[in-house]
């Protein structure tokens, strides 16, 4: 009977120490840090195979297309990405954050001014069968870039 009691206590302890929900703030911080350090491989590592990226009329689908057309083409043109979270939520299989963003836009040539981009974002993450969290959906709605003073 004592050994059975220890099995139950051990099981309860193990269950109490594990959590299926993710810390979405930490996950998005890692993702934003990868953008700010211009680490394209790390960003691509966060993408799900079936990820969708939507911005205005632009829609990229799949890890390969999103990594090439959003990450690799955009990364050299931006710096100092910041987010302000307005809403977030998690459960055992999904997590999201939504809010506003601002980013410095680097000029295409040295004689042009730096710009600032601002807009709204949502990042939706899903837990894979292997237990890792991957970015499943990213949507940006931005205002026209303004010259930075």
Image: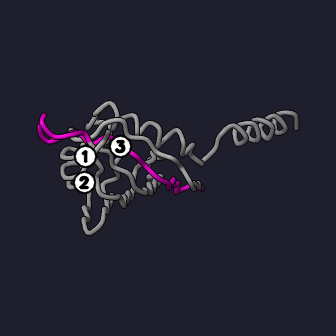
Residue that numbered label 2 is attached to: 66
Residue depicted at 42% across the width and 56% down the height? 121
Name which of mark 3 and mark 1 comes first in the sequence. Answer: 1
| Mark 3 or mark 1, whichever is nearer to me | 3
Name which of mark 2 and mark 1 comes first in the sequence. Answer: 2
Q: CA distance from mark 3 to mark 2?
A: 19 Å
Residue depicted at 33% across the width and 49% down the height? 117
Query: Dot 3, crowdedness within 10 Å: few (<14), some or many (≥20)?
Result: some
Whether pointer 2 and pointer 1 mark residues with C-beta atoms closer than 8 Å, the reply is yes
Residue that numbered label 1 is attached to: 71
Q: Which residue is most to the top? A: 37
Describe the colour scheme in one phrase.
one colour
Kind of element beneath mark 1: helix
Residue 12: x, y in percent? 76, 41
Whether residue 138 sits left or right of residue 40 in the image: it is right
Badge number at residue 50: none
Closest to the observer, 16 or 41: 41
> Hey, which quadrant is residue 16 in on the image?
top right
Whether pointer 3 and pointer 2 mark residues with C-beta atoms closer than 8 Å, the reply is no
Query: Dot 1, crowdedness within 10 Å: few (<14), some or many (≥20)?
Result: some
Residue depicted at 31% across the width and 59% down the height? 53
Residue that numbered label 3 is attached to: 103
Closest to the observer, 113 or 78: 113
Residue 64: x, y in percent? 21, 52
Question: Is residue 108 a member of the stretch shown in magenta?
Answer: yes
Q: Which residue is most to the bottom? A: 57
């Amino acid at each position: 009977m004592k050994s059975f009691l220890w099995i139950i206590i051990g099981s309860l302890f193990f269950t109490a120490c594990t959590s299926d929900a993710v810390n979405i703030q930490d996950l998005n911080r890692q993702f934003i840090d990868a953008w700010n350090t211009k680490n394209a491989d790390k960003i691509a590592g966060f993408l799900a195979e079936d990820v969708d990226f939507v911005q205005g009329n632009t829609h990229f689908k799949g890890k390969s297309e999103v990594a090439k057309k959003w990450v690799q083409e955009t990364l050299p043109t931006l710096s100092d990405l910041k987010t302000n979270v307005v809403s977030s939520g998690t459960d055992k299989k999904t997590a999201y954050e939504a809010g506003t963003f601002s980013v410095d836009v680097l000029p295409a040539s040295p004689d042009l001014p730096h710009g600032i981009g601002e807009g709204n974002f949502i990042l939706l993450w899903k837990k894979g069968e292997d237990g890792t969290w991957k970015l499943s959906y990213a949507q940006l709605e931005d205002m026209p870039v303004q010259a930075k003073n």
